[in-house]
Image (cartoon, grey):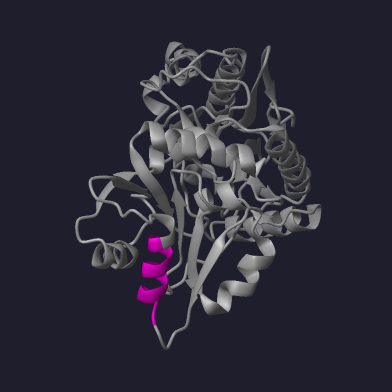
């Protein structure tokens, strides 16, 4: 698995004219090596030469045993001690990775992850350093999942669905959003997840009109629609699901926007197939809500890719025209948000297959009244 990932990386680096790539402790390093480091204040950099020679890892000496025991690929380790600082270890690693130097070539680095500290350390040793953004390349490599990745994601889905059902069963009037959030977090761990994918969202009543609501002490009230957005992490891969439930009988308008959102979700799932695009899927969901008269209240994209991270490529939104290939995983999550009143979101995790698409999430999408 890791060998094929590295081969694809090196082929792309050479095609793009890069001498190599330097990665921070983050999702991309995990994807290529299996390593998971806490990103602290001590310099840690992985260097991947485009010629396919052994990657080099510059790291604090206190992380050396962890790296040696947990890396899934062969790597040369260049540890450094606090008393010495990282520059000598980094210089040695660069000399091994690029014995002919880097004159006239570029290094791919992560524009959204690399900090000034790491960039300045490289520039000190390589005054003429030219860099390019490694983000698009790594995002493209990670977008289609192999069988092992799909298996991990599928189990993460099973865990969060079990936890979500347990959470919904505990909803009571007067319970705060924050208290229900804690119940949800506990249920995800009890189900067998390593952790939550992200901090869950509990948005009830007028708070449901905010797609990224921060859980509050507002008590749940009869008549509320309650959005529950949560996920589980299993073997390094995540799930992401949203269901909206009603506490007691909701208003006629609440039922109306729920029915529209449910129909939009179904239209989006039906639009999924190999070769389709994020643009086409987004159009399918958005059209349903627009024709129902609530187009101005669907205020975010239809979905996003996920895998190691909660948000990856592809984006399921207008302008995302690349064809979706088998193995691509992403969400379908249309919503309607009425400011100051209420809101609905229904989110499923999709997988493009060789001959169609499959919803990995299977919890009922009909409005549940608790």
Instruction: Say which of 347 and 154 sits in front.
Output: 154
Q: Quadrant of the N terminus?
A: top right
Residue lying farthest to the bottom in this orientation: 83
Query: Is residue 370 visible to us here?
Result: no
Give the residue displayed 72% in from the left and 42% down from the top: 152
Residue lying farthest to the left in this orientation: 128
Q: Position of residue 290 (x, y in %)?
A: 42, 15
Would residue 369 be counted in the magenta stretch?
A: no
Instruction: Say which of 136 and 218 sits in front.
Output: 136
Give the residue displayed 67% in from the left and 48% down from the top: 232
88 vs 280, left or right, is: left
State the image quarter where residue 148 is shown. Answer: top right
- Per the picture, the main secondary structure of the magenta-coloured stretch is helix
369 vs 82, left or right, is: right
Give the residue displayed 38% in from the left and 56% down from the top: 99
Q: Which residues are magenta?
A: 85-95
Residue lying farthest to the front in this orientation: 100
358 vs 258, left or right, is: right
Give the residue displayed 76% in from the left and 45% down from the top: 159
Q: Position of residue 351 (x, y in %)?
A: 64, 26
Q: Quadrant of the C terminus?
A: top right
State the image quarter where residue 146 is shown. Answer: top right
Q: Position of residue 140 (x, y in %)?
A: 47, 33
User: 313 above or below 201?
Assistant: above
Q: Position of residue 124 (x, y in %)?
A: 25, 67
């Amino acid at each position: 698995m890791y060998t094929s990932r590295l081969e694809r990386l090196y082929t792309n680096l050479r095609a793009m004219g890069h001498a190599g790539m330097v990665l921070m402790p983050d999702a991309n390093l995990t994807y290529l090596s299996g390593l998971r480091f806490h990103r602290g204040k001590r310099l840690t950099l992985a260097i991947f030469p485009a010629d396919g020679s052994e990657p080099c890892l510059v790291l604090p000496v206190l992380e050396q045993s962890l790296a040696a025991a947990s890396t899934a690929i062969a790597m040369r380790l260049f540890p450094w001690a606090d008393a010495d600082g990282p520059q000598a270890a980094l210089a040695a690693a660069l000399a091994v990775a690029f014995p002919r130097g880097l004159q006239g070539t570029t290094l791919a680095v992560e524009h959204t992850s690399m900090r000034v500290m790491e960039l300045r350390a490289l520039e000190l040793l390589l005054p003429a350093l030219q860099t390019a953004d490694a983000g698009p390349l790594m995002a493209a490599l990670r977008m289609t999942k192999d069988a092992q990745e799909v298996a991990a994601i599928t189990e993460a889905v099973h865990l969060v669905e079990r936890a979500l059902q347990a959470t919904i069963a505990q909803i009571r009037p007067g319970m705060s959003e924050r208290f229900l959030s804690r119940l949800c977090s506990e249920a995800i761990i009890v189900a067998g997840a390593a952790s939550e994918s992200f901090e869950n969202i509990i948005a009830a009543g007028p708070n449901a009109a905010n797609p990224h609501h921060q859980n509050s002490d507002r008590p749940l009230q009869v008549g509320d629609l309650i959005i529950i957005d949560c996920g589980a992490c299993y073997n390094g891969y995540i799930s992401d699901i949203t269901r909206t439930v009603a506490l007691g009988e909701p208003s006629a308008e609440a039922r109306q926007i729920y029915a529209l959102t449910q129909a939009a979700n179904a239209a989006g799932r039906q639009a999924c197939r190999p070769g389709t695009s994020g643009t086409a899927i987004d159009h399918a969901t958005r059209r349903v809500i627009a024709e129902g008269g609530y187009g101005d209240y669907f205020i975010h994209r239809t979905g996003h890719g996920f895998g190691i991270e909660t948000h990856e490529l592809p984006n399921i939104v207008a302008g995302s025209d690349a064809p979706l290939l088998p193995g691509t995983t992403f969400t379908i999550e249309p919503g309607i948000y009425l400011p100051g009143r209420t809101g609905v979101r229904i989110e499923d995790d999709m997988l493009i297959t060789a001959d169609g698409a499959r919803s990995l999430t299977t919890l009922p999408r009909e409005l549940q009244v608790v």
